[in-house]
Image (cartoon, rainbow, N blue to C red):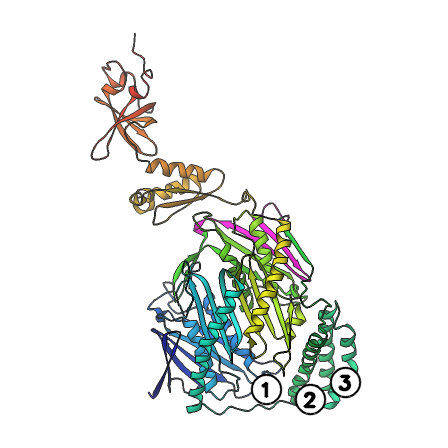
């Protein structure tokens, strides 16, 4: 094996890039190592692009291997890794969103990037994977406008210091007050993924600056590597569009666009133009050997629309639907009202984007078990997002979940997690499902708003409402100082604009950010300005939400299970569980409840129709520690010559000596008391072994009357 290693220090940690012949069939590959974490990235471009006409074909895979953490997971009969975990899919999306804008989109050859996690140590494998991808692409012969750098900026809960590359492996509810991933190049940023606990805009902007400084180190490192042994890039010429085709476009398509492109029919007319233009090109280029020129000609429509939206926004401040550049579309919010059966629901409209969110509450036993490469934990708050075909006025496959749906669901989950009440205060497992029912731009942010309404309608005591908005950008290609920010972008502005900057938060600060761009990168100054624009819009949306419901409802739905909490001593846990779970299973069956016991002795009982109350009563009786002077009602369970044994509570027994039965002489115990009798008792003695002695006469001296 031939190999060579290069070192660089990023965020105070040493990183080693190893180049070898291990994957020498790939166009580019590298093994990146830091703090015990090892990832391998490979990049390959197909030999032929004739089968991939019509779009830039990029696929990214992030492969988690359980051996990387020294684990053997899986079922009894299968120990191979199965479908990618949620975290692996999200990591692949982050890599894709970072590198995709830096490819020339006219390339039709398929490009595939595969990142394999070989070992997990003290460095985040996702961050290392993004940087390894950049190195593999940059050093390869694949045309790509990199390199880029990726860093994580984090602040642990309760800590004031913001650190770079502060990796804390956990899939549980966030261990960070700030978890920010930033990717970029040339002092610009092209991808952001963040969750924060109400961080102020100014502080977030400083974090962008900090990240950019470290990103530059990554870029400089890769440029030096390329100067040493980088491959010459392949050249893929761009097909020129025939003059006659442009003339047909000007005659058949351009007039309808010029008439209605900047109106409320903007989305409709662009869709109609695509259909008409495709039909024209199918007739003009019917043969297979003309597919390449037909594909390039299809792109001409998109180039026209891109130029038209940019020109009108930059020169005249005119948007597709005629709004001001800082204007939010018409808002509508509704909490509840769908069905009394539901635990909570919310409907949110922002223009033609409509979302329905529904809440379901369960007990601690309903938490999702996370069994991953980096950590194992349980998750009590989940947000899931669905985008059915009808949402965009189309037909299509229904069922399963794609990467986009998963990414949007997790973005809303990040935005809402900082306001979810702690388990000790609200022990429910919380699931919100957002259904995108109509889409015209940023359904993910509308989902955050609708989910907030559903949570408050369901009586979940969130700390404060959360709302989200997307800010777009139209920038001059030649002069980066000429740009226009667009508040609340709709479909065409998202598709043809330069960025989609999603910012969610409360009235106090930011809770989540996601940035996607279609250009090489966006200046940090522009992003800081966009944060301020997003806050203004967010406060407006929060007013609409709180006008509909200004606080969580006082009570949860009567259809939701009831959860009661009781605290027992740690040394009593075994007694409640019983041998082989005998005791706790009997309580569950008798009361039709779910019972969860934490290591600290906190017991959560989930049930309906009085079952939770009954189970708690049994547990309290089982664990009650009686002391001298306590009184109770008991049942006589056994008679002896010297007295009677009485059971109190769940299964605590004690002796009533014959002399303590009545305030008069009792010759024979069975003369005045029988098994099964209910009697009052008072505890008069607890010996060193915890055995109890009772007295009936001290509990009630008149309970037994002497025989006359």
Q: In the image, is residue 278 above or below residue 461?
A: below
* Earlier sequence position, callout 1 versus callout 3: 1
Is residue 316 shown to the viewer in this render? yes
Mark 1 and mark 3 residues within 8 Å of each other at the beta carbon: no
Check residue 366 in the rendering and tell me which mark sits there, or answer none. Answer: none
Residue at mark 1: 50
Mark 2: secondary structure: loop
The alpha-carbon separation of the residues under discs 3 and 2 comes to 12 Å
Q: CA distance from mark 1 to mark 3?
A: 26 Å
Looking at the image, tell me whether mark 3 or mark 2 is earlier in sequence order.
2
Q: Is residue 528 above or below residue 670?
A: below
The quarter holding residue 524 reads bottom right
Vertical order, 387 against 212 (above or below): above
Residue 248 tag number: 3
Q: Nearer the viewer, mark 1 or mark 3?
A: 3
Q: Viewed as shown, does residue 613 lie left or right of 480?
A: left
């Amino acid at each position: 094996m031939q190999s060579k290693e290069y070192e660089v220090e990023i965020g105070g940690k040493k990183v080693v890039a190893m180049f070898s012949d291990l994957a020498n069939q790939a166009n580019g590959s590298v093994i990146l190592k830091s703090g015990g974490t090892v990832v391998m990235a490979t990049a390959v471009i197909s030999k032929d692009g004739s089968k991939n006409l019509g779009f830039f074909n990029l696929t990214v895979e992030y492969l988690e291997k359980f051996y990387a953490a020294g684990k053997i997971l899986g079922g009894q009969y299968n120990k191979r890794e199965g479908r990618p975990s949620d975290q692996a899919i999200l990591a692949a999306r982050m890599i894709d969103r970072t590198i995709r804008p830096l490819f020339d989109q006219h390339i039709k050859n398929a490009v595939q990037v595969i990142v394999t996690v070989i070992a997990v140590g003290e460095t985040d494998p996702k961050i290392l994977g993004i940087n390894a991808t950049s190195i593999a692409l940059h050093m390869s012969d694949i045309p790509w406008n990199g390199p880029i750098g990726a860093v994580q900026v984090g602040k642990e809960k309760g800590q004031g210091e913001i650190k770079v590359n502060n990796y804390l492996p956990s899939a549980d509810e966030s261990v960070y007050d700030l978890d920010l991933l930033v990717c970029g190049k040339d002092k610009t940023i092209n991808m952001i993924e963040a969750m924060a606990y109400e961080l102020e805009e100014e502080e977030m902007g400083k974090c962008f600056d900090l990240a950019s400084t470290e990103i530059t180190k990554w870029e400089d490192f890769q440029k030096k590597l390329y100067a040493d042994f980088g491959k010459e890039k392949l050249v893929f010429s761009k097909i020129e569009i025939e003059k006659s085709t442009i003339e047909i476009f000007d005659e058949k398509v351009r007039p309808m666009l010029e008439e209605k492109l900047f109106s409320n029919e903007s989305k409709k007319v662009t869709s109609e133009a695509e259909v008409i233009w495709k039909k024209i090109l199918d007739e003009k280029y019917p043969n297979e050997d003309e597919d390449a020129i037909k594909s390039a000609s299809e792109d001409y429509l998109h180039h026209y629309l891109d130029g038209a939206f940019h020109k009108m926004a930059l020169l005249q401040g005119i948007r597709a639907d005629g709004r001001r550049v800082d204007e939010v579309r018409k808002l509508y919010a509704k909490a509840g009202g769908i069905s009394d059966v539901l635990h909570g629901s919310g409907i949110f409209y922002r223009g033609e984007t409509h979302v329905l969110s529904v809440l379901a509450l369960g007990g601690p036993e309903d938490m999702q078990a996370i069994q991953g490469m980096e950590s194992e934990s349980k998750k009590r708050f989940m947000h899931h997002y669905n985008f059915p075909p009808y949402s965009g006025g189309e037909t299509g496959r229904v069922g399963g979940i794609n990467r986009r749906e998963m990414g949007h669901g997790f973005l809303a989950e990040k935005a809402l997690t900082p306001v979810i009440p702690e388990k000790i205060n609200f022990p429910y497992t919380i699931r919100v499902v957002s259904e995108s029912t109509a889409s015209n731009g940023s359904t993910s942010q509308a989902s955050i708003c609708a989910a907030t309404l559903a949570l408050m309608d369901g009586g979940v005591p969130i700390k404060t409402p959360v709302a989200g908005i997307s800010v777009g950008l139209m920038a001059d290609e030649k002069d980066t100082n000429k740009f226009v920010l667009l508040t609340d972008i709709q479909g065409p502005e998202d598709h043809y604009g330069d960025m989609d900057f999603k910012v969610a938060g409360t009235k106090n600060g930011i809770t989540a950010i996601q940035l996607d761009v279609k250009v090489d990168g966006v200046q940090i100054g522009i992003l800081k300005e966009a944060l301020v624009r997003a806050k203004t819009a967010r406060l407006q949306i929060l007013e609409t939400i709180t006008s509909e419901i200004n606080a969580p409802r006082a009570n949860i739905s009567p259809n939701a299970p009831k959860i009661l909490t009781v605290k027992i001593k740690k040394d009593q846990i075994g007694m409640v569980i019983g041998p082989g779970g005998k005791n706790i299973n009997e309580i569950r069956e008798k009361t039709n409840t779910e019972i969860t016991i934490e290591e600290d002795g906190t017991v959560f009982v989930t049930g309906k129709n009085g079952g939770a109350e009954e189970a708690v009563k049994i547990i309290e009786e089982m664990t009650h520690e009686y002391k001298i002077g306590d009184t109770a009602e008991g049942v006589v369970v056994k008679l002896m010559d010297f007295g009677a044994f009485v059971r109190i509570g769940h299964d605590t027994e004690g002796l009533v000596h014959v002399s303590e039965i009545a305030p008069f002489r009792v010759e024979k115990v069975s003369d005045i008391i029988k098994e099964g009798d209910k009697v009052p008792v008072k505890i008069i003695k607890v010996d060193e072994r915890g055995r109890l002695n009772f007295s009936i006469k001290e509990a009630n001296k008149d309970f037994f009357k002497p025989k006359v």
